[in-house]
Image (spheres, rainbow, N blue to C red):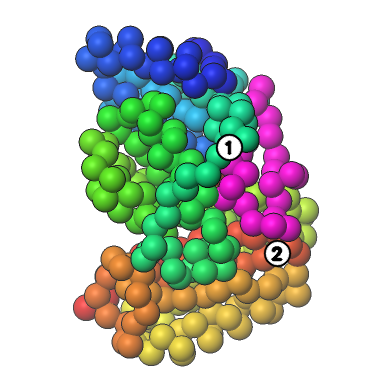
């Protein structure tokens, strides 16, 4: 396993692999890896010849006052896990290569980013799209792997790949959960025991939403209100959003019907967690 932090060297290594006709699989991450990340790595391993994972806490996707400075980092622990998975290359780019002092070109998705996390974290997806374009240009992957936990991100990346004519096949893989169904997330590390218990209300709310819809409820506000009640029972919580949208274009719905997304972002004493369920309603 090779670890690089330099763009030129990384490009050289990947050029050699490509000349050898190797299929390059790529998993972008911000590190402090968990089973959610590893599920992506395992798929990449199964479907490609040379697996690259990037670890980069991307400053431009964090808003002012967010946790960029305190975001947990442990490259040693991450490399150990990735070695066991048989990853070929870890790319941890240095700041200078990613954002030189004259950095002034950004990539902006302007439609799917209008709702959910795009709305509650202005500039977030501009940061995500920009860093991904840079990473894709360095790695030139054939296949990339993303998680459904970040449903909106996955839709935006799919759009980016199509709109910008990348020859990349994208895979979106299911959300990996803890035993009590909390979606795995690096930010779960911020939670103390009580907060960790309270965080169960996130999946409880999603499940309630799904159940109400299955029972025939078609009014968005009724389902959202009942979900809100579940979250607000815990004193540590603050709701950033709970929304039920069209799962294909993320537009709001008059009536719950077709392929829909129930998505939420909730703060547990300041730790922002997201989760979602996509379902088809006849
Ligand atoms: N529980 C999960 N199951 C499947 N994929 C996941 C899960 N959590 C994250 N991913 C995916 O891993 C990739 C890298 O995500 P990232 O490094 O931001 O991890 P994270 O756990 O989402 O961190 P954070 O808590 O800071 O948002 C993304 O494609 C993301 O969707
Ligand atoms: Mg994330």
Residue at point 67%, 79% (across, down): 232
Between 162 and 264, which is closer to the camera in this rendering?
162
Say above or below: 135 vs 17: below
- Please say if 231 is above or below 142: below
Res. 61 visible in picture: yes
Q: Residue at x 62, y 67 (%)?
A: 266
Magenta stretch: give its range.
Answer: 56-76
Q: Secondary structure at mark 2?
A: strand
Tell how many labels. Answer: 2
Residue at image position (28%, 16%) is 18
- Residue 143 drawn in magenta: no
Magenta stretch contains residue 71:
yes
Q: Nearer the viewer, residue 242 or 6?
A: 6
Q: Nearer the viewer, mark 1 or mark 2?
A: 1
Residue at mark 1 to residue at mark 2: CA–CA distance: 37 Å
Q: Is residue 224 above or below residue 21?
A: below
**Residue identified by numbered label 1:** 102
Q: Residues within 10 Å of mark 1 (few under 14, many from 20)?
A: few
Nearest the viewer among 215 and 220 is 220
Residue at the image point whose x is 33% and y is 28% from the top: 140
Image height of 58 relative to 234, above or below: above
Q: Mark 2 — residue? A: 268
Marker disc for residue 39 = none
């Amino acid at each position: 396993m090779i670890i690089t932090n330099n763009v030129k060297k990384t490009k050289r290594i990947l050029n050699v692999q490509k000349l050898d006709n190797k299929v390059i699989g790529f998993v972008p991450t911000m590190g402090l890896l968990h089973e959610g990340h590893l599920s992506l790595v395992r798929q990449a391993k199964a479907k490609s010849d040379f697996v690259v994972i990037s670890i980069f806490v991307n400053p431009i996707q964090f808003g002012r006052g967010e946790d960029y400075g305190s975001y947990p980092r442990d490259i040693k622990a991450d490399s150990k896990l990735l070695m066991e998975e048989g990853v070929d290359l870890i790319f941890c780019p240095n700041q200078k290569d990613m954002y030189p002092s004259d950095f002034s070109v950004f990539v902006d998705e302007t439609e799917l980013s209008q709702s959910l996390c795009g709305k509650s974290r202005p500039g977030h997806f501009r940061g995500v799209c920009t860093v991904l374009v840079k990473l894709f240009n360095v790695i030139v992957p054939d296949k990339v792997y993303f998680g459904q936990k970040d449903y909106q991100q996955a839709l935006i990346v799919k759009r980016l790949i199509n709109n910008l004519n990348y020859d990349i096949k994208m895979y979106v893989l299911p959300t990996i959960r803890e035993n009590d169904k909390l979606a795995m997330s690096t930010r779960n590390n911020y939670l103390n025991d009580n907060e960790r218990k309270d965080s169960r209300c996130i999946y409880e709310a999603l499940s309630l939403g799904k159940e109400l819809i299955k029972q025939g409820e078609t009014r968005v506000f009724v389902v959202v209100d009942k979900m809100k009640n579940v979250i607000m029972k815990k004193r540590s919580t603050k709701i950033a959003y709970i929304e039920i949208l069209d799962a294909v274009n993320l537009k709001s719905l008059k009536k719950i019907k077709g392929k829909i997304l129930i998505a939420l972002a909730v703060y547990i004493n300041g730790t922002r967690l997201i989760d979602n369920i996509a379902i088809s309603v006849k």
